[in-house]
Amino acid sequence: MSVAAKICGLSEPESLRAAVAGGARYVGFVFYPRSPRAIAPPMAAELARLLPTGVRSVGLFVDPDDEYLEHVTGQVPLDLIQLHGAETPRRIAEVKGRYALPVMKAVKIGGPEDLAAALEAAEVADRLLFDAKPPAKVSALPGGNGIAFDWTILAGRSWPRPWMLSGGLTAENVAEAVRVTGATAVDVSSGVEDRPGHKDPALVRAFLSAVAAL
């Protein structure tokens, strides 16, 4: 089975080149100021221009307003907008209509009851991304916390839109995650870092090698 990989939270040329060379089909830039992976639009634009044909650039936003979306999309050549906050289906539709870009909606999973939100989002989003719900009463980011959820929640299920699996993935566990969930696309961020916000090219290569072996 061919599995597509997304390396999210890139911020420098060396790790981006490792992602491209390793076969990543998507690279993500984080436009959320509170994240240690946040990147300024001018730098993201420089990196996006290094991407060869066939590698798609993804902009990650958390409950962005129109002013901020226009600020970023006016500078960075994005192929896909990823909404990683509490955006409603109506807001997803607004973003799609205003920016004429496909939208991927992140759905945070803590238990089976959270799957209902995925079905609602799928009515308007072009893609879904299943991520781990941040722990309650713990200071955590909307994503990129290095936490996995119970993959069996997704086992045997089908969805009306293409989807990615995220949350706590590493080179060591991605094969098992794909086996359990049936994912055909995976997303990694903290699992290829040697410190928060810094991608290690060697870990990027190891993760993509593990995905390629599936």
Image (spheres, helix red, strand yellow):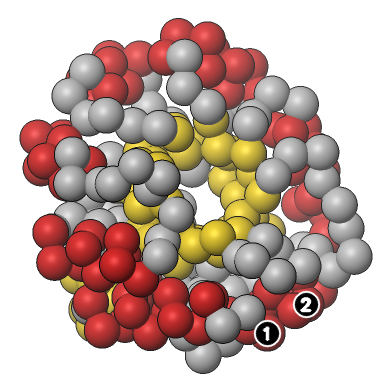
Q: Whole-percent x and y of residue 127?
A: 63, 39
Pointer 1 and pointer 2: residues touching (CB < 8 Å)? yes
**At 22% across and 30% down in the image, what residue appears?**
76
Callout 1 secondary element: helix
- Whether residue 136 appears in this view of the structure is no
Q: Farthest front residue?
A: 53
Quadrant where the N terminus is found in the figure: bottom right
Residue at the bottom extreme?
172
- Of 206 and 139, nearer the camera is 206
Please name the residue shown 60% across and 59% down the image.
185
Using the rendered view, name the quadrant where residue 148 is placed: bottom right
The residue lying at 52 percent from left, 76 percent from top is: 212
Report the Cα–Cα distance between label 1 and label 2: 6 Å
Residue on which the image places disc 2: 180
Which residue does the numbered mark 1 point to in the structure image? 176
Residue at point 88%, 58% (across, down): 157
Residue at the top extreme, as displayed: 98
Residue type at tag 2: Val
Q: Which mark is residue 66?
A: none
Q: For this rendering, which residue is in front, 203 or 98?
A: 203
